[in-house]
Amino acid sequence: MSPQQFFPFGTPEGEPYELPHPCPSCGGGQGVYREEGRHLVGWCTCGHRQRGYVSRADAGLTPRTVSTIRRGVSEGLRRRIYERDGRRCQLCVLQDPDAPVLAFKDFEVGHLIPVSQAIALGLADEQINDDLNLAGMCVPHNEDLGRTGVSESLWLRLLILRRDSA
Ligand SMILES: [Zn+2]
Ligand SMILES: [Zn+2]
């Protein structure tokens, strides 16, 4: 199906941006981009769909990085996970059910699939910061986790623990 058939009345709605290369159909340089699934797709104003995906940088959006996604863990979210996880590091609790309660300032929220891996897997920000992927951590455990992530068996034990203590 050609773009003209797909959008018989011209350019689809989207955010305006400058095409990084002249449009192969009309040679123009102005277009729009819009979200299709997890990607941004560019269209020339002539209605020609541009090849490949539009990078978030070309679209003038902040590129997704470990730190921008980590910033998505707001104070409110951290507070909620703190209460959900009984104010304890979930990895400490697996080793010792009587692991000490952490002060809120010492309580971190770790990503079970590390953010860098999750970006590489193409997960959306909301998926990366989904409650299911978050667990309360002490500082040393969260540092370890950032490097390695947790194994599938450890993750399953965490989810069972969470279910049983709910
Ligand atoms: Zn064009
Ligand atoms: Zn710990």
Image: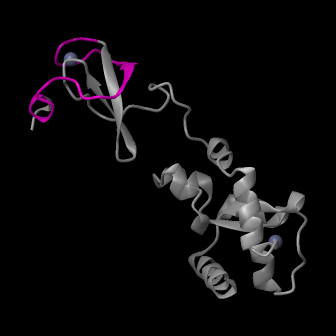
Picture quadrant of ligand 1: top left
Q: Position of residue 50 (x, y in %)?
A: 26, 28
The C terminus, quarter of image? bottom right
Q: Residue at x 16, y 18 (%)?
A: 25
Is 44 placed left or right of 81 in the picture? left
Q: Which residue is found at the position 64% from the left and 71% from the top?
A: 150
Q: Name the spot of residue 115 as percent of width and height, x first.
A: 61, 54
Is residue 6 found inside the magenta-colored segment of the image? Answer: yes
Q: Is residue 160 above or below residue 5?
A: below
Is 51 on the left-hand or right-hand side of 137? left
Q: Relative to residue 39, is residue 8 depicted above or below?
A: above
106 lies above or below 30: below
State the residue at coordinates (37%, 21%).
Answer: 16
Residue 58 in view here: yes
Left or right, 89 with respect to 51, comes to right
Q: Is residue 53 magenta?
A: no
Quarter occupied by residue 98:
bottom right
Quarter that holds the N terminus? top left
